[in-house]
Image (cartoon, rainbow, N blue to C red):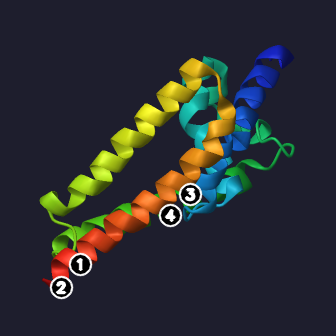
Amino acid sequence: MNKKIIEEFQEWIKQNLNDPLAKTLLENSNLTKTQFETFLIDIFSKHYHSVFSKSEIKAALRLKGKVSRGAFNRTKAQAIKNIIKAIYTILLLGYTGIFDSSKLDPFIELSQKLDGYIKNIKKEGNYEKYSWIAKILEEELKEALNFNNKKRKN
């Protein structure tokens, strides 16, 4: 297999893992860095190059060196389990009435703001603003949660 293709893909993974905003989001998620890296490799490798569709090759793409196919698949399963649990948590909050469609609006708006911030940063090329976005994201998330709690008490 072409070493250059592997290096390009690994560089893309590194950029995603070292992105300041991605780091902040990852730190506040329920995924480990290894689980996130494994999930990125699994999801995007087949779109990057057809030869990356084999499990043995995906296991070799990890940045800290090749792991066994079994270890790669176990880490992937852990990542998927954690992602599913996060989605179940949101569904549970909706089911119990904590999040109904109108109360999800602040979170949808926050997601749209985040998307807008990122597009502006990429357009301007001013990546120092990522830490600013992370702080705003945390403040607005707390505010949205407080809004839901205040509204529920009334």
Q: Do tag 1 and tag 2 residues touch (Cβ < 8 Å)?
A: yes
Identify the mark at residue 153; answer none if there is no mark.
2
User: Mark on residue 79?
Assistant: 3
Q: Amino acid at mark 2?
A: Lys
Of the residues shown, which amino acid type is indicated by label 1?
Lys
> Label 2, label 4: how many angstroms apart (C-alpha)?
31 Å
Relative image position of residue 66 (x, y in whole percent): 84, 43
Residue at x 19% of width, y 63% of height:
103
| Vertical placement of residue 138 versus 54, above or below | below
Kind of residue at disc 3: Ala
User: Which amino acid type is marked by label 4?
Assistant: Asn
Q: Name the front one of labels 1 and 4.
A: 1
Residue found 36% across the figure and 49% down from its top:
110
Residue 20 is at least partly visible in this image: yes
Q: Earlier in the sequence, mark 1 or mark 3?
A: 3
Instruction: Indicate the position of residue 120 as horizontal and vertical percent values.
Output: 50, 26
Are discs 1 and 3 less than 8 Å apart at CB? no
